[in-house]
Image (cartoon, rainbow, N blue to C red):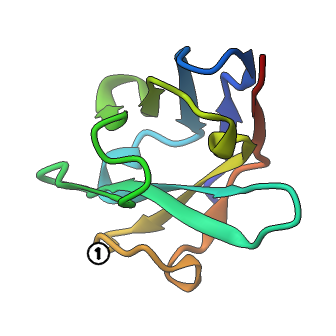
Amino acid sequence: QVQLVASGGGLVQPGGSLRLSCAASLYTFRNYTVAWFRQGPGRERDFVAVISWGRSNTYYADSVKGRFTISRDNAVNTVLLQMNNLEPADTAVYYCAAQLFGGNSDAEKDYNHWGQGTQVTVSS
């Protein structure tokens, strides 16, 4: 069973940056496609970004392109989400999700393993 731990959230001013981390409990994390989703106040959970297993291909939601960067460090079983130029609309609980040998999907249903979420608040 894969356990995912999301961390790095916090309070930041508009225009600021945060880096989220998704750490996994197993050494075969390199074989998992990992995505970030977020759920803002009163909203459904939305796709943010994904990085594939193998070639680490990436794909982003239009709302974060050019501001967020997803990457992975398989040596320490971690996927990172660097978030720059944050906006109040980015305020949400951010979740990481993983799927063994998964495709670069933006759909929640395609991920079997989920972390607990980390709160990101963008406010002045």
In front: 29, or 117? 117
Q: Residue at x 77, y 55 (%)?
A: 40
Up/down of 121 relative to 114, above or below: above
Residue 11, percent across and down?
78, 18
Name the quadrant of the C terminus: top right
Q: Residue at x 66, y 51 (%)?
A: 95
Does residue 115 appear left or right of residue 101 in this picture?
Answer: right
Q: Which residue is mark 1?
A: 103
Residue 122, percent across and down?
72, 28
Residue positioned most to the left:
55
Q: Residue at x 53, y 18 (%)?
A: 15
**The residue tagged with tag 1: helix, strand or loop?**
loop
> Which corner quadrant of the image does residue 111 belong to?
bottom right
Does residue 47 appear left or right of residue 39 in this picture?
Answer: left
Does residue 1 appear left or right of residue 124 in this picture?
Answer: left
Residue 16, percent across and down?
55, 14
Three-letter residue code for mark 1: Gly
Q: Residue at x 86, y 56 (%)?
A: 41
Residue 28, percent across and down?
38, 48
Name the quadrant of the N terminus: bottom right
